[in-house]
Image (cartoon, helix red, strand yellow):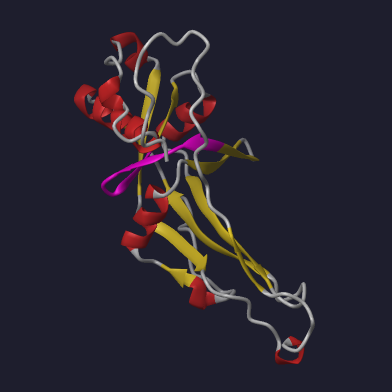
Amino acid sequence: MTAIPDTRLRRVAERGSTDFDLACAIVDAARIAHVGFVIDGIPYVTPMAIARDGGDLLLHGSVASRLMKHLASGLPCCVTVTHLDGLVLARSAFHSSMNYRSLMLFGRAVEINEPEAKVRGLDALVNHLVPGRAAELRPSTRKELNATTLLALPIETFSIKSRSRPPADAAADLDADVWAGVVPLTLRAGEPEDAPDLKKGPRPRNYL
């Protein structure tokens, strides 16, 4: 019998949340997550592209992947998503911090085998990475679909933690002659780089 994960926050509990809509927003703002699992007593953490379909987190990979085979069999996993929004620079190292949004999701993934649902799920992954991209591509072949495993992990058992405020310096440090504040951090797309063998075709507009 698998133990139920304890998602209660004991450290700085006021930063925690179990709001489903917030969990979905954290997933929707991410392109990548880290999937943790244990095989034969050895822990592994694998970075993977993600997307969301309603109340499910979508994961995909090769049918030959050991990770996908184990997750499809019902192996428990823990998926984490983190957004680093800023460096919080206080007047002391002790009170310096980061502004962030993080999600820790526990559960067992289910394989999506129904052909139409699988195509929709894979299109959702493509469009999450580059909005509208799936409509620009040729349809996946049956061979490609058969070579790909698509998993859905319910967004049910999770823990959220976030921080979004300025530094909280000790009163005794407020007169120190040192700058304090927040350095915002964002992920931005650069200028698209054409493939060496590119012929014709519009550049993507909505890369991030």
Q: Residue at x 30, y 18 (%)?
A: 137
Q: Position of residue 92 (x, y in %)?
A: 77, 76
The image quadrant that residue 59 belongs to is top left
For residue 178, what is the image quadrant?
A: bottom right
**What range is drawn magenta here?**
47-58
- When the figure is inspected, residue 204 is found, relative to residue 52, above or below; the finding is above
Q: Residue at x 29, y 32 (%)?
A: 132
**How far across and how far down the image is residue 99, in percent?**
56, 65
Residue at left offset 57%, top offset 37%? 46
Q: Please, what is the dominant secondary structure of the magenta stretch?
A: strand
Report which quarter residue 95 is drawn in: bottom right
For the residue pair 73 and 10, the one nearer the viewer reads as: 10
- Of residues 35 and 194, the one nearer the viewer is 194
Residue at the limit of the structure toward the right, as seen here: 177
Above or below: residue 198 compared with residue 157: above
In the foreground, 19 or 91: 91
93 lies left or right of 136: right
Q: Is residue 121 left or right of residue 4?
A: left
The vertical placement of 19 against 31, above or below, is below
Query: How far across and down, in percent of the image, does residue 6 sit?
Result: 49, 64
Q: Position of residue 118 (x, y in %)?
A: 27, 27
Q: Is residue 185 left or right of residue 151?
A: right
* Magenta segment includes 65: no
Is residue 165 or residue 109 the one in the foreground? 165
Residue shown at 45%/58% (left/top)? 4
Q: Is residue 52 a member of the stretch shown in magenta?
A: yes
